[in-house]
Image (spheres, rainbow, N blue to C red):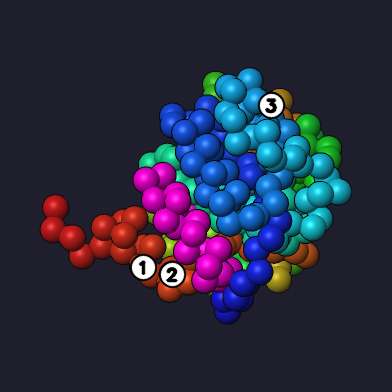
Amino acid sequence: MAENYSQIKRVAISGSIHKVGFTDAATELIDTLHSHGVEIFVEGKVYNFLQKSDVQPIKDCKMLSDKDLLSMDLVLSLGGDGTFLKTSQFVGALEIPILGINLGHLGFLVDISGDEISSAIETVLSEGFITERRSLLQMRPVGECTDPGKCNALNEIAVLKTDSSSMIKVHAYVNGEFLCTYRADGLIVSTPTGSTAYAMSVGASILDPESQDIILAPVSPHTLNQRPIIIPDDKLIELEIEGRSSNCIVSLDGRSYRCPIGSKISIRKAPFSTLVAWRKGHTYFQTLRGKLMWGQVQ
């Protein structure tokens, strides 16, 4: 269920400095927050970029530290869905609400478009916001992914063949019971949030983000009878990789690591959530209709 928030006094800003229009959007955002007396903290890379770009409002902001992050009421992610995923990784287990501002294209996690920053932020500051609690996946460190803090994913964890290799075999187990062997270019393990991301591109079902489920979906399966499956998210998923190459790729929300063939990859639901912030009145089905243009005549 959605949770309501009303007091917004300390805000952190993160974002993608490479997005077209980022400097202008950041300037407008900071100006709007300052006009309402909000204390602003800016993630280090963004802070340094805006300083070098001679953005005047940055002089009244502070560079965000790990200690500062603990006391934030809201984190603003300036970019798109990919930027939002990086911000979620940055926030980690702190469960601070994240509000996305879209400077990209199609986005399911970002609520505010780049041409409505001032009006939308003023609405959020005056009326508060709601959040949706989104589940994450957690992988046991394996291969090049050795830092437990980086082994979480809001969208999906995908095991993929290397670019030049033939298909791989992924032997999948659920709570210790053998499920099947996927002969494919890879296997996606997705959250409900990720059901509109990589999983959707391979034909998996779209899940309501409050669903307590996990999707297993093969990538380009080499047999027609291997289809996506949905299982409860309290299950432990174990994957054993077989292939002709020496390595496969493990991708967590687009962050890629090499993993030796023969490794066992363990995946389960993370013990914490990401809080996705929205303006009041938002519903998930509104987002689906708008982003996927359901019901519109082409």
Q: Secondary structure at mark 3?
A: helix
Query: Residue 190's x, y, as percent?
Result: 57, 56
| Label 3 sits on residue | 48
Kindly report which numbered mark, 2 or 1, lies closer to the viewer in this rendering: 2
| Label 2 sits on residue | 282
**Is residue 179 at least partly visible in the picture?**
no
Quadrant of residue 146 within the rendered picture: top right
Residues at circles 2 and 1 in contact by the CB criterion of under 8 Å: yes
Kindly report which numbered mark, 3 or 1, lies closer to the viewer in this rendering: 3
Residues at circles 3 and 2 in contact by the CB criterion of under 8 Å: no
| Label 1 sits on residue | 286
Looking at the image, which residue is at 47% across and 64% down? 123
Q: Nearer the N terminus, badge 3 or badge 2?
A: 3
Query: Residue 271's x, y, as percent?
Result: 78, 65
Span colored in magenta: 107-131
Looking at the image, which residue is at 50% across and 56% down? 121
Q: Which mark is residue 249?
A: none
Q: Residue furthest right?
A: 67
Magenta stretch: residue 126 in it? yes
Quadrant of residue 16 within the rendered picture: top right
Query: Label 1 amino acid?
Result: Gln
Looking at the image, which residue is at 45% across and 49% down? 117
Q: Secondary structure at mark 2?
A: loop
Looking at the image, which residue is at 37% across and 45% down? 115
Q: Residue furthest bottom?
A: 1
